[in-house]
């Protein structure tokens, strides 16, 4: 399979170096392209990414790009998803650039889950997962919301959005992601779309996840209120929720490649 590795980043210059260094020569050869997409960092993160790409990643093409506007985390996903479709890649791996996840956890088992699944999703809270540095109240909140989302979709959802996931191109071509919110809640909308689609097959795999010098952009209580609102809207009118456009965006999302020039 010709795979694309998508690494979204925002103000994580120290972490993006470590994230890219997880790409051993063996892992580099698994990908046709590594697409690092910055959403307006002010800490020099794109420059750090370009240095590692140029000096240390010899076995894969690495494009470091920046969104032309602030599209949010969800909007960055949409830029990358569309690129995967346009370039004709067979699938896309999402791997957040803040160095919380361990890429090999997913890549070592990916082939076992294909071709029987359209999505293979990393899970921080299922048996076999390993979590380091997470506060107990954050773990409890995640598990609670996993249970609620599982109950309302009648599916076992082990993680609502870990930041380490795989999607096939046929899944992306269905476009379920297009109407999801562009902000940090993007994955919650997408998992509801995925679990509610009758012809989409997905599985979860346990992964390692740690938090040490990373700073989360999701504030617990504010984020929790947004999730409760999403749940309420879904329960109030499931069909309207699934067909509504939650992005609030009009126009084309574009980005500029920094280490190759031109438009992505």
Image: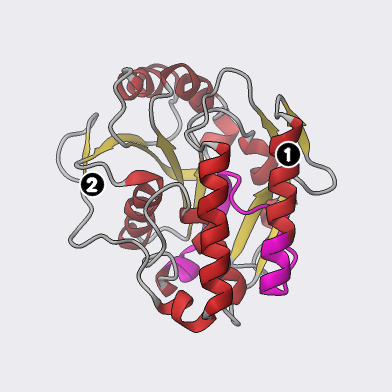
Q: Quadrant of residue 66?
A: top left
Residue interval drawn in magenta:
148-172
Point out residue 37 in the picture as x, y percentages from the top left corner: 34, 38
Residue 83 appears in the rendering: yes
**For this view, does 115 lie left or right of residue 89?**
right
- The residue wearing badge 1 is 139
Q: Residues within 10 Å of mark 1 (few under 14, many from 20)?
A: few
Above or below, 24 against 155 in this view is above
State the residue at coordinates (22%, 31%).
Answer: 258
Given residues 134 and 231, the one toward you in this image is 231
- The residue wearing badge 2 is 264
Above or below, 59 against 50 in this view is below
Q: CA distance from mark 2 to mark 1?
A: 37 Å
Point out residue 213 in the picture as x, y percentages from the top left corner: 57, 17
State the residue at coordinates (32%, 25%).
Answer: 46
Q: Are marks 2 and 1 in contact (CB under 8 Å)?
A: no
Residue 108 appears in the rendering: no
């Amino acid at each position: 399979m010709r795979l694309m590795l998508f690494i979204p980043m925002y103000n994580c210059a120290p972490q993006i170096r470590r994230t890219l260094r997880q790409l051993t020569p063996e892992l580099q050869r698994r990908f046709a392209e590594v697409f690092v997409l910055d959403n307006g960092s002010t800490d020099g993160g794109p420059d750090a990414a370009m240095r590692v790409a140029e000096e240390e990643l010899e076995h894969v093409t690495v494009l470091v790009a920046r969104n032309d506007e602030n599209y949010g985390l969800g909007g960055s996903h949409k830029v990358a998803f569309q690129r995967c479709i346009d370039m004709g890649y067979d699938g896309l791996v999402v791997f957040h650039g803040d160095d919380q996840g361990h890429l090999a956890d997913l890549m070592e088992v990916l082939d076992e889950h294909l071709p029987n699944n359209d999505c293979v999703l990393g899970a921080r809270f299922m048996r076999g997962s390993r979590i380091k540095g997470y506060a107990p109240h954050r773990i409890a909140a995640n598990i609670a919301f996993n249970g609620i989302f599982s109950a309302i979709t009648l599916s076992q959802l082990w993680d609502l959005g870990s930041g380490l996931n795989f999607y096939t191109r046929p899944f992306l071509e269905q476009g379920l992601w297009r109407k999801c919110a562009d902000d940090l809640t993007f994955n919650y909308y997408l998992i509801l779309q995925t679990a509610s689609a009758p012809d989409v097959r997905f599985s979860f795999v346990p992964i390692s996840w740690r938090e040490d010098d990373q700073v989360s952009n999701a504030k617990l209580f504010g984020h929790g209120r947004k999730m409760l609102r999403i749940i309420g809207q879904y329960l109030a009118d499931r069909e309207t929720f699934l067909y509504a456009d939650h992005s609030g965006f009009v126009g084309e999302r574009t980005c500029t490649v920094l280490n190759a020039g031109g438009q992505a």
